[in-house]
Amino acid sequence: MTTTPEYAALTDWCRISGMTRTATYYALARGDLRAKKCGRRLLIHVPSGLAYIEALPDATFGLKTPKAA
């Protein structure tokens, strides 16, 4: 059984979440993710970050139907 850390460094967060660094910074700027600064390190609050990802809309996939001539 693995436990999820309370906070993760940016590189660890990207590995845990699958988000890119750029997407993470945009989410932080919008206030979608919580983070703390510890010296020069940026620590992402993992539980709230995972809740943010869970709240995103589900992906939908479908085939485009050809238009009738």
Image (cartoon, rainbow, N blue to C red):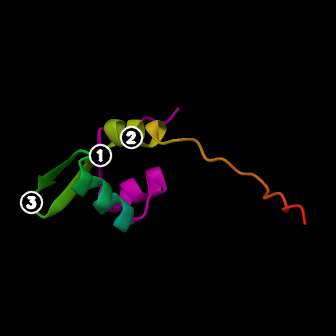
The amino acid type, in three-letter code, at marker 3 is Gly
- 49 drawn magenta: no
- Asked whether residue 31 appears in the rendered view, the answer is yes
The answer to which image quadrant residue 49 occupies is top left
Quadrant occupied by the C terminus: bottom right
Range covered by the magenta-colored residues: 1-20
For disc 2, the marked residue is 52
Q: Position of residue 19 (x, y in %)?
A: 44, 58
- Looking at the image, tell me whether mark 3 or mark 1 is earlier in sequence order: 1
Q: Secondary structure at mark 1?
A: loop
Give me the C-alpha separation between circle 2 and circle 1: 7 Å
Q: Secondary structure at mark 2?
A: helix
Q: Secondary structure at mark 3?
A: loop
* Nearest to viewer (mark 3 / mark 1): 1
The answer to which image quadrant residue 66 occupies is bottom right
For disc 1, the marked residue is 32
For disc 3, the marked residue is 39
* Nearest to viewer (mark 3 / mark 2): 2
